[in-house]
Amino acid sequence: MTRRLALSLTVLFIAVAAVAHTADSLVLVSADSAAIATADTVGIPKRPGFFKRIIDYFTETEEEELAARNKRVRFSVLGGPSYSGDSKLGIGLAGVINFRTKGSEYPMQPSTAMVFASISTEKFWTAGVRSISFFKGEKIRLNCDIDFSYSPRRYWGVGYDRGNVNDGYIKLKEYDIFVVAEWLWRVRHNLYLGPAVRWDYVNGGSNDHPEYFNGQDVVTRNYGVGLVAVYDSRDVIQNAYSGWYVYLGQMFRPKWLGNDYAFSTTELRLSHYRKAWKGAVIAAEVRGKFNFGNPSWAMMSLFGDNYTMRGYYKGRYRDKHIVTAQLEVRQHIWKSIGLVAWGGGGSVFHDTDSFKHWLPNFGIGARWEFRNRINVRLDYGFGKRGQSTFIFSINEAF
């Protein structure tokens, strides 16, 4: 497995580099072409090797980085293969847009939007946008996520005991849409408050096994309104070296908003980052999501995604409440290359009596900083009973 993983990482890095293009890099290509056109008058220099040219193509010089800091809009595109235990072999494309609104010039950090799409051999597909925008010198923040996906996935039902049976699942053809927006105002230094709205649509397909859904509808729609409080002292949001991030969100989904299943959700995230020895950053995080009332099967708290409990099949373990914790060491190795290792665990439960099963999680990963503080992320996570998942993404998990 180690040899296969190493080969997969190598192929992925080469494929990403081969198909990715950036708007800024076009200037480099033009300059290189001009140099070749006049080479017969000045002598032809020795052409660098293939891999060296790929690395140079995507590695910023210090001058380029300084010149880019005050650009209003900067666009980069990455694409390449991916693999996970859920969706198997796939191919994805992601565009990262860094932009600056009026009053948010350097040294303030730029706004960021990531547009992404992927499809796999198992017919999984997803597309969406994730963004965080700063206005009036970071006095106002707008966080917005939009996601569309189709997942021919396995569904074990609700509760730890259901998910703990290897072959105790049914197959669903699940369509998901969610839209969430948070509008936050800075009320004190690093402290933000504001309203939030969210809409979720989940269609589980045909219902041939009603016992797995506890009498609930297979198609659910949920409308929510709420409040969010954020404390954020991170130096850079997408790849922090220092600081704290505390998120407390309260979402309400009452009957009068058109919800068939009325409930409320409290979410908590506590993250801390600090530099350790040379080239190393230690990142720690605790998350909790707690549903009160009558959430549908589709709105339960889920184990396993690209950000926490990496290595578990998404949704195999689900229940009203979830608590997770992870500690990650991020080590710079050479130039734009780094390695990470993490460990942690979590639990799903529906009341205090069922809060007794702790599931382990650990893994390793590689990082490639293709733009200043923007990483290509390759993770291989492990969980209980031999579960494992390979993840390809952009930016850190947390």
Image: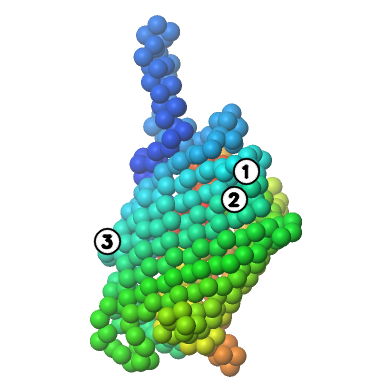
Q: Nearer the viewer, mark 1 or mark 3?
A: 1
Q: Nearer the viewer, mark 2 or mark 3?
A: 2
Q: Residue at x 65, y 50 (%)?
A: 138
In the picture shown, does residue 337 fall above or below 396?
above
- The foreground one among 161 and 70 is 70
Amino acid type, label 3: Thr
Disc 1 and disc 2 in contact, CB within 8 angstroms: yes
- The foreground one among 377 and 34 is 34
Q: Residue at x 65, y 64 (%)?
A: 193
| Mark 2 Cα-neighbour bin, 10 Å: few <14, some 14–19, many ≥20 | many
> Which mark, residue 104?
1
**Location of residue 177 by image quarter:** bottom left
Q: Of callouts 1 and 2, which one flags the residue occurring earlier in the amino acid sequence?
A: 1
Q: Of callouts 2 and 3, which one flags the residue occurring earlier in the amino acid sequence?
A: 3
Amino acid type, label 1: Ser
> Which mark, residue 327?
none
Q: Is residue 145 left or right of residue 36?
A: right
- Does residue 286 appear anywhere in the picture? no
Q: Position of residue 2 (x, y in %)?
A: 43, 59
- The foreground one among 263 and 275 is 263
Q: Position of residue 308 (x, y in %)?
A: 52, 67
Say which residue label 2 marks: 134
Q: Residue furthest top?
A: 41
- Colouring used for the render: rainbow
Q: Of callouts 1 and 3, which one flags the residue occurring earlier in the amino acid sequence?
A: 1
Q: Position of residue 104 (x, y in %)?
A: 62, 43
Q: Residue furthest front?
A: 256
Say which residue label 3 marks: 121
Report helix, strand or loop for mark 2.
strand
Q: CA distance from mark 1 to mark 3?
A: 42 Å
Report helix, strand or loop for mark 1.
loop
